[in-house]
Amino acid sequence: MKAMVLHKVCTPLVLETRPLPDPGPGEIRLVLEACAVCRTDLHVVDGDLPNPKLPVIPGHEIVGRVDALGEGVATLKIGQRVGVPWLGHTCGHCPYCASGRENLCDEPLFTGYTRDGGFASHVVADAAYAFPLPEGEDPVALAPLLCAGLIGWRSLVAAGDARTIGIYGFGAAAHIIAQVCLWQHRQVFAFTRPGDSAAQEFARSLGAAWAGGSDEEPPGRLDAAIIFAPVGDLVPVALQATAKGGRVVCGGIHMSDIPRFPYRLLWGERQILSVANLTRQDAHDFLSVAREARVRTETVPYPLEAANEALDDLRAGRLQGAAVLVPGRH
């Protein structure tokens, strides 16, 4: 198998040829069709997230076909298309798992971080954390749903029944969840990097009622805000724009420090919430919603060997939608 491997944080991935791995009990092996590139992959590669398993193969928005079954796997079959997300395994016995909050598990494994992921031609995954995907869809288009879509969905659920949603950072997650918002008859205000007219036009093309820089005032108060950009400075900005009783949801796994801000921005029963990982129920719920809402992803395909280029483009903000690695593409 071929894989793009991280040996040391803050260094480029290295293309390697490795022996084909065998799935263990309860595991499956996939032949990769596509793997989207997530900002969390950047946080792993750039050292923002502590203690990755090194060396590690990043990537956790995986679409592939089962080509080997480990002992005891009866729910999936050879040739079936499945998706593998960030949450790769949970302990099943800690207080969080026991109370339906496996996203907060005390002993988790994360795909592409603490177990090898999908920047490769093959991957081994826990069968219980893989989800059947439709056969008639483009795997490149499906891949961003496995994290950008899932975390976007969990963030939207955390925002409650807000009718006007402000989305800060209009990248892969935002462009998916904006479509869900519109399907639910919510109004979307899109906030981009100041001066990023291309991203603002992209947001408007998806149906955003307003799009502007994060340094601009929206045309009306927000019922809730979702922050996908990993920028702590946006928290007080979003609070300032949010109406009394509203929520500001921080949807990223990593964010720069939140600056001090006056209590008046929080007063009025505003809330600040964070979203951590996902549950398998989130995946089942969102994949159903994505089909009903006819979500369409904007993607930029790259060959597997160009993973470093895809990461650089994401880091520099040169992408609209999601970068997707496609093994075998040239």
Image: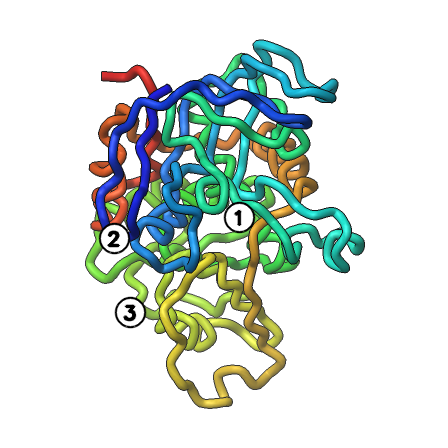
Which numbered disc, 3 or 2, marks the residue that appears first in the sequence?
Answer: 2
Camera-nearest label, 1 or 2: 2
Residue 33 in view = no
User: Is mark 1 in CB contact (under 8 Å) with mark 3?
Assistant: no
Q: Position of residue 275 (x, y in %)?
A: 56, 59
Q: Position of residue 302 (x, y in %)?
A: 27, 27
Q: CA distance from mark 1 to mark 3?
A: 25 Å
Dividing the picture into quarters, in which one does residue 169 lie?
bottom left
Tag 1: Cα neighbours inside 10 Å, few (<14), some, or many (≥20)? many
Say which element carries label 2: loop
Which quadrant is the N terminus positioned in?
top left
User: Is mark 1 in CB contact (under 8 Å) with mark 2?
Assistant: no
Camera-nearest label, 1 or 3: 1
Tag 3: Cα neighbours inside 10 Å, few (<14), some, or many (≥20)? few
Q: Which residue is mark 2?
A: 10
Q: CA distance from mark 1 to mark 2?
A: 25 Å
Q: Which mark is residue 215?
A: 3
Measured along the vertical axis of the image, is residue 19 above or below residue 154? above
Q: Which mark is residue 251?
A: none
Residue 91 in the figure: left or right of residue 162: right
Residue at the (52%, 27%) spot, across then down = 124
User: Is mark 3 in CB contact (under 8 Å) with mark 2?
Assistant: no
Q: How is the image coloured?
A: rainbow
Tag 2: Cα neighbours inside 10 Å, few (<14), some, or many (≥20)? some
Instruction: Say which amino acid is labelled 2.
Output: Cys
Q: Which residue is mark 1?
A: 151
Residue 150 in view = yes
Measured along the vertical axis of the image, is residue 236 above or below residue 200? below
Residue at the (29%, 40%) spot, across then down = 320
